[in-house]
Amino acid sequence: MPVNIMLADDHRLFITGIRNLISADPALRVTHVATNGQELLDLFLTRLPDIVLIDINMPIMNGLEATRKIRDHYPRVKVIIVSGYNDAHLIAEAMEAGARGYLLKDCNAEDLFHTIHLVHSGQTSFPFRPHLPVQNFETDNAFLQQFHLTRREKEILQLISRQHTNQQIANHLHLSIYTIETHRKNIMKKLQLKTPAALMKFILTHPCHSVIFGFYCLVLLS
Amino acid sequence: MHFIPSIPLQAVMHYFEYKSGDVIGMLPLIGMWSIITVLIFMLYKIESYKKKEFILLHRIHEQQEHELDIQEAERRRIAADLHDEIGSSLATIKMNLQSLRYSSVYDEQRATSLLELVDQTSQNVRRATHNLIPPHFETTPFTSILQSYFSSLDSRGAIAFHYYCNAYQHYFSTRQELLLYRIVMELTHNIIRHAKASEATVQILFCPTYLEIMVEDNGIGLPPAIQQGIGLSSVHSRVKSLEGKIHMDSGRCGTTFIIHVPVSCEHAC
């Protein structure tokens, strides 16, 4: 039994191109094509496909919307998004909408066949993107890390612990006093502290103190 | 005739006598009065000029906002055309090239080099489209788009970018989010182009009544030419359009931008 595939894309020439390409594999068969999400869902009434290849940008009902509907009403139909966009936030949205795979429109034929077979066998296939949060503010102190303090904020925290005034910190770091005040406010917010006294207490009682002392030594040495 | 009251001649004479006798004594008083009158008149004029100035400034502000909107609409249109027409056509060309059968090795080699060219062009189109406006901007929080931008930058640039955003709040309209996104992107590009920095931090902090954008680098400070340049003036006009405040702090140890944008009442409450 060949895998039954439906295509949905408003670009007719693209549909013809991908259809020609798929026809090279005897294990795959394109049964129907649609030019938007609604048309595709209407086709489902006559027959359910195994796999749907669907574009994101389409009139009337776009691909992501159609994918959500298919997930909710036809959970057995597997959806692969075929899009011209290569953006992490769209790939994440496609995953969230219930797609099993994501292909770029200008992918290689091998990738196309590979993804279709992979998804048909029940697996998922998404382009690899390192979607790690970019906030690698030092890893030396696990305790401070939970507050997401930036390097500059830690530097200022350390200067505060040395009883520096805002003006002294500003001179030391070649910044304006307004910048320091803003940093100070942000530090307090991130540490969920309300008063300067609470900040002092935090500095004195938490393990960050030793690291700050280390920082202090470094600054003295340099 | 008898309706006109007759003025006694004596009274008139008396009036003129009185007048001519004291006219010199009253001169300073008259002078003061006229000066006060002129002053009041001038104050009134200044007041009306101020009003006019205010109206004109308001009109310029509106004009600038309108220009920004037109610019964005145009960008969207070009991006949509690029993606839908050229991007899709390139993909179609590639699909068709891949499904062709070649009779000789030579033909196949030529097809392969054509495919490479198509790939390259597709990538360029994709980059250009993304630079015009990130896809599906309307349905994605601008902080997520920035997140994916900085995670893609992080791996290839000479500058280590750190990005941090606290819990996203839906404070702003799409139009305002686009302005915020452009502000951050412009400041980031400035760092890449001019700051000669090795590290930079971008923070987007949602506070109860305002949004704070803080962009810092450890470079050499912005040269005056850049501070007066088109890029930063576009940042200023966007901040103004959002009724926000911008603070720049540039020195030999780097540059810090702090931008505060107020949250409109309906969202803040």
Image (cartoon, coloured by chain):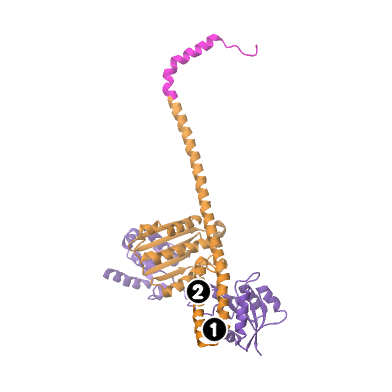
Q: Colour of chain A?
A: purple
Q: Position of residue B83 (x, y in %)?
A: 56, 70
Q: Which residue is mark 1?
A: A111
Give the residue furthest to the right. A46
Bin the neighbour count of mark 1 within 10 Å (Cα to Cα): few under 14, some 14-19, many 20 and up.
few
Please tell me the colour of chain B: orange
- Above or below, B108 relative to A167: below
Which dot marks residue B121? 2
Magenta part of the chain? B1-30
Badge 2 and badge 1 both on one subunit = no
Label 2 with label 1: CB-CB less than 8 Å: no
Q: In the picture provided, is A201 more to the left or to the right than A23?
A: left
| Residue B16 in magenta stretch | yes
The quadrant holding residue A100 is: bottom right
What element does badge 1 sit on? helix
Q: Residue at x 51, y 87 (%)?
A: B105
On whether residue B202 falls in the magenta region, the answer is no
Instruction: Name the side, left or right, on which A185 lies relative to B173.
Output: left
